[in-house]
């Protein structure tokens, strides 16, 4: 969602703080703005020209007569209330021009607050929910309250999940921050202090990061009303294993392409960290007694988007390897289902960022119902990792592209390892079988490398489809979630209408949509449903649709049916989703690239979704 950066200190180098804001571009945004206090003056600059906004701001900054300041606030906006216009871009000011605020999240009761403030004579300049914060704080300060107390009182009146950072012209050495559920980190380094919504903003600026405690106003700088440095010293620093170099493009034209190529290593690092050299389980971060896990009678997996699709693959893995019934749901739906949970239920929350609000809130409710919980996340110290009883980290490194690739493979790897462990605990897998399964999973790295290296061969084969506008993805069994992920990638990167179906469902309705303009992408595994899938391909063929089949090397059965066959190496059917998804990620990326779209920052999307 929105990205926040704030810095305070004597002689701040504004260009390096702005660089921190740039590092949050990957979260997705439509407009951006900064507020700077220098020599007691508050300057605000905004740009709302979509992804070029950052360049406009950089030009503005370098054209100024000053290059240092005492305070800098920066914000990238992903709109929830109000169009992406200049007026709606943050920072927002109060009526006097003393208070500048940036905000991430949603203020659910902003309409009442706005009406009340307007009645008292406040003039609003934007359609945002955020602006009420500046006006409410203006009133508190006018009433003589100290800034931290005033912000605390304002915050109590705001309903919803959010993080806020405030700068005051009348207190130029101070920065205030507060949050509820939404992410906000703080750091201090060499007489400078920082707030940011996301660690990458800090990577070049500070070494130790702390999470701002919920509902506590933290004051950074030489604030008269508090000492943020002293508060931070009482907190546990977060361990962030990434360096600023990890997030640098490595000769690739886009992070999407780079991260797709990093998939085998992301997968290997994840899976190998969860086993010994002798293929025994390593589960020290699970923090759930094996005795309790043995008692589990139901598994629930929740997540959003690509993480949800990994969860759907996980269902097949857990049911097959551990013989425990599994339910999978999107987090935003599960939370409102009034689910039936008890201490014998294990809930697995999957989130690359560990900050998707819906996954966090759903997991919290599961905890309240007495279930045991595990987080699968890529971000050490993220909220999801701290909310859950135990955690399995995916070790994919930072994922910058909004569209996930390598973390999806790492998530399936982590789920595979968990399924094997549960199978072992439940006595479904004998120790030698579980070791064999772990070795097999690790060996998938080699097949993944081969698959990823085939992309150039596929490009030439896909030329005929570049201008098609209707795609259907079909698969069966554990290849159906892969089809769903293929359709999601196509939509989010290429903006092409794409739907996914279990192949057997086509004849129950969707087949009516097939004609010679449609393209069907079919996943043909070498599994027990292979021949049934071939019958489904015949049905497609008979309707004149173009047919791309993803099949394993040596399987010639689709050759007469398909217009194009994309080949992947053969593997155990259980692990085939790891390979099958790669050509679909590549297809969507290639279509988007040829059409001239930005692969890393698809329109309307945010990398981390911290609103409901
Ligand atoms: O950080 P999370 O894994 O919780 O994010 C969930 C989804 O927002 C995310 O997977 C989204 O669908 C991506 N754009 C997929 O490419």
Image: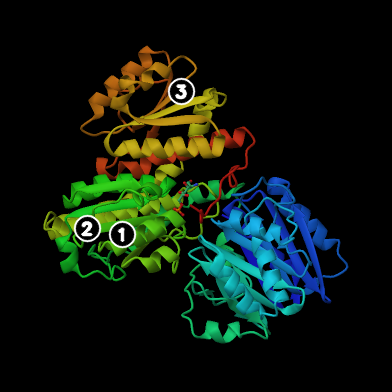
Residue 273: numbered disc: none
* Mark 2 in CB contact with mark 3 (< 8 angstroms): no
- Which of label 2 and label 3 is nearer to you? 2
- For mark 3, what is the residue? 519
Element marked by disc 1:
helix
Element marked by disc 3:
strand
- Which of label 3 and label 1 is nearer to you? 1
Q: Say whether disc 2 or disc 3 marks the residue closer to the N-terminus.
A: 2
Foreground residue, 32 or 280? Answer: 32
* Mark 2 in CB contact with mark 1 (< 8 angstroms): yes
| Residue 71, above or below 252 | below
Quadrant location of the N terminus? bottom right
Residue 265 appears in the picture as rendered: no
Q: Say whether disc 3 or disc 1 marks the residue closer to the N-terminus.
A: 1
Residue 488 image position (x, y, % from top left): 46, 38
12 with respect to 542 (left or right)? right
- For mark 2, what is the residue? 345
Q: CA distance from mark 2 to mark 3?
A: 41 Å
- For mark 1, what is the residue? 366
């Amino acid at each position: 969602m929105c990205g926040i950066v704030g810095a305070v200190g004597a002689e701040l180098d504004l260009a390096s703080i702005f660089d921190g804001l740039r590092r949050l571009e990957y979260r997705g945004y439509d407009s951006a703005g900064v507020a700077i206090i220098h020599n007691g003056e508050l300057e605000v600059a905004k740009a709302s020209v979509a992804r070029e906004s950052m360049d406009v701001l950089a030009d503005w900054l370098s054209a100024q007569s000053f290059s240092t300041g005492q305070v800098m606030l920066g914000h990238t906006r992903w709109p929830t209330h109000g169009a992406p216009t200049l007026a709606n871009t943050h920072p927002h000011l109060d009526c006097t021009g003393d208070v500048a605020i940036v905000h991430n999240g949603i203020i659910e009761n902003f309409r009442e607050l706005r009406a009340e403030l307007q009645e008292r004579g406040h003039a609003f300049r934007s359609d945002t929910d955020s602006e009420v914060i500046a006006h409410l704080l203006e009133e508190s300060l006018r009433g003589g309250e100290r800034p931290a107390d005033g912000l605390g009182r304002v915050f109590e009146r705001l309903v919803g999940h959010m993080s806020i950072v405030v700068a005051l012209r009348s207190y130029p050495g101070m920065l205030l921050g507060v949050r509820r559920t939404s992410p906000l980190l703080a750091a201090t380094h060499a007489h400078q202090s920082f707030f940011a919504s996301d660690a990458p903003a800090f990577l070049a600026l500070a070494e130790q990061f702390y999470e701002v405690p919920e509902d506590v106003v933290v004051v950074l700088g030489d604030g008269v009303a508090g000492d943020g440095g002293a508060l931070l010293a009482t907190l546990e620093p977060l361990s962030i294993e990434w360096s600023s170099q990890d997030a640098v493009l490595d000769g690739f034209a886009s992070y999407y392409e780079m991260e797709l190529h990093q998939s085998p290593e992301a997968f290997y690092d994840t899976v190998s960290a969860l086993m010994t050299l002798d293929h025994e389980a390593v589960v020290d971060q699970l923090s759930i007694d094996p005795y309790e896990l043995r008692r589990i009678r139901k598994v629930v997996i929740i997540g959003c988007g690509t993480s949800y699709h990994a969860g759907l693959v996980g269902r097949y893995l857990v049911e097959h390897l551990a013989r425990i019934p599994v339910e999978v749901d999107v987090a935003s739906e599960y939370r409102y289902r009034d689910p039936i949970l008890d201490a014998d239920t294990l809930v697995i929350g999957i989130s690359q960022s560990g900050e998707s609000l819906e996954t966090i809130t759903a997991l919290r409710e599961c905890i309240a119902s007495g279930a045991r919980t595990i987080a699968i996340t890529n971000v050490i110290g993220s909220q999801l990792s701290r909310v859950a009883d135990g955690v399995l980290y995916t070790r994919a490194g930072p994922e910058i592209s909004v569209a996930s690739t390598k973390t999806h493979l790492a998530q399936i790897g982590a789920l595979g390892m968990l399924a094997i462990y549960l199978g072992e605990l439940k006595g479904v897998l004998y120790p030698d079988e579980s070791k064999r399964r772990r070795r097999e999973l690790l060996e998938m790295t080699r097949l993944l490398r081969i698959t990823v290296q085939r992309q150039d061969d596929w490009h030439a084969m896909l030329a005929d489809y570049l201008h098609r506008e209707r795609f259907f993805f079909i698969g069966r069994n554990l290849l159906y979630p892969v089809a769903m992920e293929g359709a999601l990638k196509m939509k989010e990167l290429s903006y092409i209408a794409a739907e996914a179906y279990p192949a057997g469902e086509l004849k129950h309705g969707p087949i009516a949509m097939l004609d010679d303009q449609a393209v069907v992408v079919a996943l043909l595994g070498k599994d027990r449903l292979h021949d049934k899938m071939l019958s489904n391909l015949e049905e497609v063929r008979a309707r004149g649709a173009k047919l791309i089949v993803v099949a394993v090397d040596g399987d010639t059965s689709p050759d007469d049916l398909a217009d194009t066959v994309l080949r992947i190496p053969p593997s155990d059917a259980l692990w085939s989703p790891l390979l099958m998804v790669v050509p679909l990620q590549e297809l969507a990326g290639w279509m988007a690239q040829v059409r001239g779209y930005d692969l890393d920052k698809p329109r309307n999307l945010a990398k981390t979704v911290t609103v409901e």
